[in-house]
Amino acid sequence: MLEPYRHLRRSLFTPPSAWVIACVPIRQLFLCLWLGGLIIIGAVVAPVTFHLLRNAPELATNAVLQTDLAGDIVGGSLSILNVISYVAGPVLFVSDMLLSMANPAGYSPSNCLKPFLIGTAWLIALLLGLALFPIMSAARQQGAAQAFDRMHHTYEIFSYVQMMLLLAYIALGAAETAYELRNPIVGRD
C-alpha cells in the first residue's frame, strides 16, 4: 500500500536534526501519560478504590459514604487525567506535524491519519473533561444517581473510544516504522 510513496520517504541513513531528536521522546512521554492514565484509572484506580472502600469495616454500614469517598478519589484522578490530555493532545499533534515536515520525502498516508487520530482523541478529551465531567460531578453531589449513572456510562464509552484512537495511533506508527525498516532507502531515485 505504501509502495508508491517509497521514493518519497526519508532515508534511514540521513541524520535527523536536533529538534527532531527532541520531538520523539517528548511525543512518547505525553502519549504514555495520556494512554497510561486512561488504562490505570479504568483498570486499577477505580476498581481497587471501590473494592477497598466497600470492604472497609469502618464504612460497612454507610454505603453512601463509601460511594462518596470512592467518587472523590476516582473523580480527583480523572481531573488530573483531563489536564494531562488537554496538554498531551496538542503536543502529540504538533510533534507529529513537525516530524512530518522534517521528513524530506514529504507526504505519506500516515502523515494525514496520525494527526486525525490524535485530534479526534483530543476533541473527545475536551468533551469529557469540559462538558461531561462537570455535569457528572454536579449530579453526584446532588444525589441524582440515575442521571449520574447514565452520564457515567456515556463517559466510559467515550473513554474507550479515546483509548482505541490512541492505540490505533500507536499501531499506525509501529506499522510505519516496520515498513521503513524493511524497505530502507539509501538515497533518492
Image: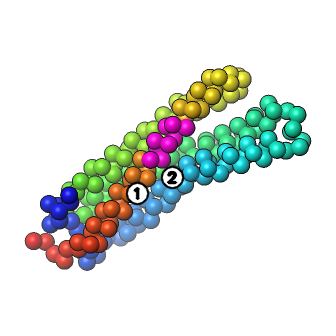
Q: Residue furthest left?
A: 189
Q: Which residues are magenta?
A: 156-164
Magenta stretch holds residue 160: yes
Q: Position of residue 178 (x, y in %)?
A: 32, 68
Give the residue at mark 1. Answer: 170
Q: Secondary structure at mark 1?
A: helix
Q: Which mark is residue 14?
A: none
Q: Position of residue 135 (x, y in %)?
A: 59, 27
Residue drawn at (89%, 43%), measured in percent from left and top? 57
Magenta stretch holds residue 130: no
Specify few, some or many for label 1: CA neighbours under 10 Å numbering under 14, 14-19, or 20 or more.
some
Q: Is residue 93 left or right of residue 163?
A: left
Give the residue at mark 2. Answer: 35
Name above or below for residue 156 compared with residue 84: above
Which quarter shows the N terminus?
A: bottom left
Which amino acid, mark 2? Leu
Residue drawn at (38%, 57%), measured in percent from left and top? 171
Q: Are marks 2 and 1 in contact (CB under 8 Å)?
A: yes
